[in-house]
Image (spheres, grey):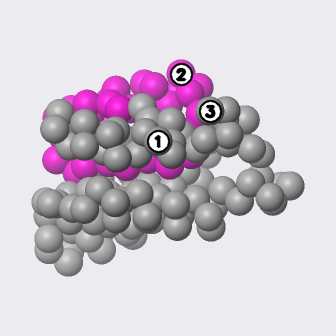
């Protein structure tokens, strides 16, 4: 399990967290958080993560605020982010991508498509064969 990539799912909907955990657990280490505040507390505690999946509409700290906070951090800014949202308008999609999201998916979604997108992003950003890229789990997040 030490060579598996670590996925942080930030989602206030229990059902969606369960679906993502069930779909991804065979291939990734999964951590779930209910909102952006919990996620930032967890990240700032030094927990390593390879990719983040976030909802936009959450209590306390929205997904867009989470993206902005992560991208403003010199320690976290390189972590890939995928947005899962019910917002279908182009303005929201464009705003998220311009703020630093790497991909945007609309709910309802196919969990296997989420898995495929995670793998595609990690192939590009987390090449285990690249000596300049530390192995998953050994990557400093700060």
- The residue singled out by tag 2 in the image is 45
Q: Residue furthest front?
A: 26
Give me the disc on residue 26. Answer: 1
Frontmost of labels 3 and 2 is 3
Residue at the image position 42 percent from the left and 25 percent from the top: 41
- The residue singled out by tag 3 in the image is 1
Specify which label sits upstream in the sequence, 1 or 2. 1
Residue at the image position 80 percent from the left and 58 percent from the top: 129
> Which of 102 and 123 lies nearest the eye of the viewer?
123
Mark yes or no: residue 117 visible: yes
Q: Secondary structure at mark 1?
A: loop
Left or right: where 93 falls relative to 66: left
Density class for disc 3 (Cα within 10 Å; few <14, some 14-19, many ≥20) is few
Q: Residue furthest right?
A: 131
Mark yes or no: residue 72 visible: no
> What is the magenta range?
32-60
Residue 31, above or below 27: above
């Amino acid at each position: 399990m030490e060579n598996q990539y670590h996925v942080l799912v930030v989602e206030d909907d229990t059902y969606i967290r369960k679906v993502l955990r069930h779909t991804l657990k065979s291939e990734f280490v999964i951590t779930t958080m209910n909102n952006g505040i919990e996620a930032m507390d967890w990240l700032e505690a030094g927990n390593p993560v390879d990719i983040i999946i976030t909802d936009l509409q959450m209590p306390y700290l929205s997904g867009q605020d989470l993206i902005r906070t992560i991208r403003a951090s010199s320690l976290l800014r390189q972590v890939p982010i995928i947005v899962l949202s019910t917002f279908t308008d182009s303005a929201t999609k464009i705003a998220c991508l311009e703020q630093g999201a790497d991909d945007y998916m609309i709910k309802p979604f196919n969990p296997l498509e989420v898995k495929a997108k995670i793998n595609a992003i990690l192939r590009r950003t987390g090449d285990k064969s690249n000596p300049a890229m530390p192995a998953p789990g050994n990557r400093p997040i700060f």
